Image: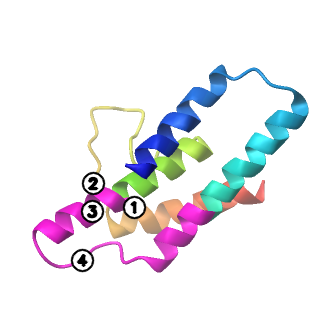
Amino acid sequence: MGLKKLQDYRRQRPLVCATKARYDQLEKQDRQAVRYLIHILETTPWSIAGSENATVHHAYITEVARTLDLFTGQDHVDPKDLRQNLPVTDVLLRKALPDWRAWLAR
């Protein structure tokens, strides 16, 4: 639920008209959010055993990755070619993490 609210907040941001100082503050907040979400992925197992628990956990990890894509302007989870339906796998996350970190470094 919290990740969905964060995604909604970020999606509405282009509609906000603000001064340069306000945009700088918003970018700083974005960087803090990205840093935190990366920390979550680095400290949380990407998959767990079980049936219901595994399904819920996979949905959570997917939403974290989707939120990182939204904040960084990347498309690891939801590719622009909507004919693809890529599952969020360990391989995808290993590939995406350096890209998300590189966004922080810019």
What kind of residue is marked 1?
Leu
* Image depth: mark 2 or mark 4 in front: 4
Residue 103 lies, with reference to residue 42, above or below; the image says above
What's the magenta region?
36-61
Residue 21 lies, with reference to residue 29, above or below; the image says above
What kind of residue is marked 2?
Pro
Q: Residues within 10 Å of mark 3 (few under 14, many from 20)?
A: some
**Residue that mark 3 sits on:** 58
Give the alpha-carbon distance from disc 4 to disc 1, as whole Å: 17 Å
Give the alpha-carbon distance from disc 2 to disc 4, as whole Å: 15 Å
Q: Is residue 71 left or right of residue 104?
A: left
Give the alpha-carbon distance from disc 1 to disc 2, as whole Å: 8 Å
**Residue that mark 2 sits on:** 87
What kind of residue is marked 4?
Ile
Q: Do tag 1 and tag 2 residues touch (Cβ < 8 Å)?
A: yes
**Residue that mark 4 sits on:** 48
The label shown at residue 102 is none
Look at the image and say whether residue 42 sits in the magenta stretch.
yes
* Image depth: mark 3 or mark 2 in front: 3
Q: Do tag 4 and tag 3 residues touch (Cβ < 8 Å)?
A: no
Question: Considering the numbered disc 3 on the image, is that residue within a helix, a strand or a loop?
Answer: helix
Q: Tell me which numbered mark, 2 or 4, is placed earlier along the sequence.
A: 4
Q: Residues within 10 Å of mark 1 (few under 14, many from 20)?
A: some
Q: Tell me which numbered mark, 1 or 2, is placed earlier along the sequence.
A: 2
**Residue that mark 1 sits on:** 92
What kind of residue is marked 3?
His
Measuring 54% from the left and 62% from the top, which residue is drawn there?
A: 37
Q: Tell me which numbered mark, 3 or 1, is placed earlier along the sequence.
A: 3
Q: Residues within 10 Å of mark 2 (few under 14, many from 20)?
A: few
